[in-house]
Image (cartoon, rainbow, N blue to C red):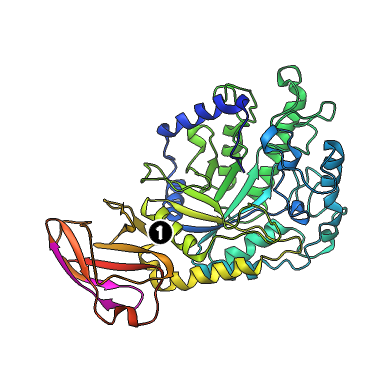
């Protein structure tokens, strides 16, 4: 994932990239358009960062990158870079997630209300969690203990398990590959996240990397069932016309054409890349302050790290539920990340968070799915969504504590000038009285409201209008 602190060398590139955001290009293919609309209705998905690095409980891949503030080496090998790199790559020889059970993950995610999954088939370190034929640095190679397991093709097993539970399927794929000798040529030490040689003087080497990348993506789009999303990370790998700092052209037009030939409905997410290959955008670890004019999702880690870290600090259920509400009220999707441990399990706290979110969604998801933003979007602790298909508006009253304690009454902006027919509290289907004055809506709570079964994190009111 993109790191929060960047070297000055890349500042020009990122400023240039972010300037592209006003130039969003909506996909032209009807099948892609339909898939994108369906994904926007899903609202909530599961992101999973998993690889050999889980054994060290360290940040995924980035310890390999000698890039100033993004360097995050730790452990007994951290003093010397080359010792660290060799030890890191030897993690392949001990990776054996014997508790791997993707059906358990799918069940937990489905209960939480998630409707799509994006899994890291390959991160920047180059270790492949699928049975690629292009390298031995993979989960199914004989050097990896788990290769003898009948479920060793982890990406395929995950996609199959989640697909059976009606999830949309997304494959994360890193464009840079720090293990491949044609990206980081062993003749030179790497100096940053980019290719470590002059491509203009070594065209044949770069062409081999392009072919390697193309073939891996051909494998993923032909041998792993229906894919809905191809989620590219490593957005700095792009042509000079889009990245003035460095020309690293892997021929995305050819890759996307091939992928869509194999998967006609495929949504492509080339993060910070050319607009035609960025079918939706991915603000990372942040929630936009207002609705955006293009399809988007916030990708956010449940803990402090994208990958597994022992005793990580996880966001509270209240923060997670309220983040979902805020994101959806602004028209986005929430892609929530959890990193499995080296044995193939999720932290019990992560399971509990998914269960707590599911409990809330069971009562209140009506206002989340198939919704669109509606003005005034939010006001203090109150947020709004509108049904995409019906004349309904949902008002969310966000609590400051786990248990919602509603006031006797509260007044807020009118989300519509139409005449109200009925207001209902979704959590217990209790009718709520209201009054309208000067374009302000006041909801009056019945005396029994807070004495019933406790409402957690946020109360949701359904507002129905007269025809």
- Does residue 267 appear to the left or right of 90 in the view shown? left
Rendering quarter of residue 421: bottom left
Q: In percent of the image, x 66 and y 38: which residue is there? A: 175
- Does residue 83 appear to the left or right of 410 in the view shown? right
Any part of residue 125 in sight: no
Residue 179 percent coordinates (x, y) = 78, 39
Residue 44 lies, with reference to residue 285, above or below; the image says below
Q: Tell me the element at label 1.
A: helix
Bounds of the magenta segment: 423-436
Residue 416 percent coordinates (x, y) = 19, 56
Residue under numbered circle 1: 325
Residue 279 percent coordinates (x, y) = 48, 42
Residue 435 lies, with reference to residue 274, above or below; the image says below
As drawn, the residue found furthest toward the top would be 201
As drawn, the residue found furthest toward the left would be 438
Any part of residue 6 in sight: yes
Compare residues 250 and 78 and report the one nearer the observer. 78
Predominant SS of the magenta segment: strand
């Amino acid at each position: 994932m993109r790191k929060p602190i960047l070297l000055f060398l890349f500042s020009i590139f990122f400023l240039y990239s972010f300037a592209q955001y006003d130039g969003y290009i909506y996909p032209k293919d009807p099948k892609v358009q339909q898939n994108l609309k369906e994904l926007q209705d899903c609202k909530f998905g599961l992101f999973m960062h998993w690889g050999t690095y889980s054994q060290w409980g360290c940040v995924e891949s980035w310890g390999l990158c000698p890039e100033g503030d993004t360097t995050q080496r730790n452990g007994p090998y951290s003093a010397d870079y080359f010792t660290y790199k060799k030890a890191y790559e030897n993690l392949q020889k001990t990776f054996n997630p014997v508790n791997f059970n993707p059906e358990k993950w799918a069940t937990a995610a489905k209960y939480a209300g998630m409707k799509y999954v994006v899994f890291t088939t390959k991160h920047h370190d180059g270790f492949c969690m699928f049975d690629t034929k292009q390298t031995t640095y993979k989960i199914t190679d004989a050097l990896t203990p788990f290769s003898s397991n009948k479920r060793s093709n982890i990406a395929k097993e995950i996609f199959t398990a989640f697909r059976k539970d009606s999830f949309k399927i997304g494959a994360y794929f890193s464009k840079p590959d720090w293990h491949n000798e044609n990206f980081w040529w062993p003749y030179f030490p790497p100096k940053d996240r980019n290719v470590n040689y002059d491509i203009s003087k070594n065209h044949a080497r770069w062409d081999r990397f392009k072919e390697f990348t193309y073939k891996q993506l051909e494998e993923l789009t032909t041998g792993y069932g229906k894919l809905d999303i191809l989620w590219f990370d490593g957005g700095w790998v792009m042509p000079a016309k889009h990245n003035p700092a460095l020309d690293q052209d892997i021929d995305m037009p050819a890759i996307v054409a091939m992928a869509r030939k194999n998967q006609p409905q495929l949504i492509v997410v080339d993060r910070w890349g050319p607009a035609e290959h960025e079918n939706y955008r991915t603000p990372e670890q942040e929630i936009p302050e207002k609705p955006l004019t293009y399809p988007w999702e916030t990708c956010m880690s449940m803990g402090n790290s994208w990958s597994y870290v022992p005793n990580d600090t996880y966001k509270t259920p209240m923060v997670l539920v309220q983040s979902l509400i805020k994101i959806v009220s602004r028209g986005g999707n929430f892609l929530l990340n959890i990193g499995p441990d080296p044995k193939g399990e999720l932290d019990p706290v992560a399971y509990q968070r998914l269960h707590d979110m599911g409990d809330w969604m069971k009562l209140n998801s009506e206002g989340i799915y198939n919704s669109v933003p509606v003005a005034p979007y939010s006001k203090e602790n109150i947020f709004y969504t509108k049904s995409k298909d019906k004349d309904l508006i949902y008002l969310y009253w966000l609590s400051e504590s786990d248990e919602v304690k509603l006031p006797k009454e509260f007044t807020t902006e009118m989300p519509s000038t139409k005449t109200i027919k009925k207001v209902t509290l979704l959590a217990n289907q209790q009718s709520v009285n209201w009054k309208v004055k000067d374009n302000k809506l006041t909801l009056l709570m019945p005396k029994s409201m807070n004495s019933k079964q406790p409402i957690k994190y946020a109360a949701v009111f359904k507002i129905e209008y007269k025809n």
